[in-house]
C-alpha cells in the first residue's frame, strides 16, 4: 500500500514538473536574436525581429518581420508547438523557418535559447525574451 501511494505521488510530481516547464513558454516572447551560420562562413544575425505568442493549448501566432541582404521577410502564420521533455521544442506550421525541432539550450522563465539545423549544414539559433 505504501509503495502504491509513493508511486502515485511520484507520478503526480513528475506530471506537475512537466506541465510547469511548458507553461513557462505560454505568453508573448520577443525574438531578441535569430542567427543563421554555416561552418567556415560569416553568419547572419538579426535582432528584435518582432514576437512569437505561445498559447496553453499548443498553438501560437508569429509576428515576425525583417530585412536581410536586401530580402524582406514576413511571417504571421499560426503554428502548433510540442514541448518534448524540456529538451526539445517542435514547431509545426507552413512556410516558416521556425517550423522544425529545436534543441533547448537555455530554459528560463524570461529567457529561452534554442538551436537547430536546416538539413543543409546551416545552424540556426533563436533567443526569446519575455
Image: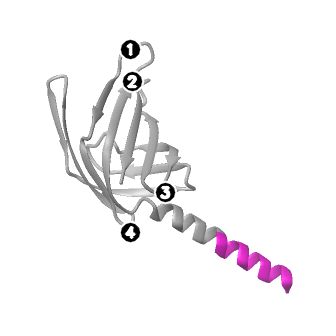
Residue under label 4, please give it.
57
Name the mark on residue 83.
3
Image point (57%, 56%), residue name: 85
Q: Who is closer to the viewer here, 50 or 41? A: 50
Is the stretch drawn in magenta largely helix, strand or loop?
helix
How far apart are the two marked residues, 2 and 1, measured between alpha carbons? 7 Å
Image point (52%, 66%), residue name: 20
Image point (35%, 16%), residue name: 42
Of pointers 2 and 3, the one earlier in the residue sequence:
2
Bounds of the magenta span?
A: 1-13
Judge whether residue 5 is colored magenta: yes
Question: Which of the 4 image quadrants contains residue 95?
Answer: top left
Image point (43%, 30%), residue name: 119
Q: Position of residue 37 (x, y in %)?
A: 39, 24
Residue under label 2, please give it.
37
Of pointers 1 and 4, the one earlier in the residue sequence:
1
Give the SS element for disc 4. loop
Give the SS element for disc 3. strand
Residue under label 1, please give it.
41
Amino acid at each position: 500500500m505504501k509503495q502504491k501511494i509513493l508511486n502515485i505521488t511520484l507520478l503526480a510530481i513528475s506530471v506537475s514538473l512537466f506541465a510547469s516547464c511548458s507553461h513557462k513558454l505560454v505568453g508573448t516572447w520577443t525574438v531578441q536574436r535569430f542567427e543563421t551560420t554555416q561552418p567556415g562562413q560569416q553568419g547572419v544575425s538579426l535582432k528584435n525581429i518582432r514576437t512569437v505568442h505561445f498559447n496553453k493549448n499548443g498553438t501560437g501566432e508569429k509576428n515576425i518581420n525583417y530585412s536581410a541582404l536586401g530580402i524582406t521577410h514576413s511571417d504571421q502564420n499560426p503554428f502548433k508547438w510540442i514541448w518534448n521533455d524540456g529538451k526539445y521544442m517542435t514547431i509545426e506550421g507552413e512556410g516558416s523557418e521556425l517550423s522544425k525541432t529545436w534543441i533547448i539550450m537555455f530554459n528560463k522563465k524570461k529567457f529561452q535559447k534554442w538551436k537547430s539545423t536546416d538539413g543543409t549544414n546551416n545552424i540556426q539559433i533563436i533567443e526569446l525574451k519575455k
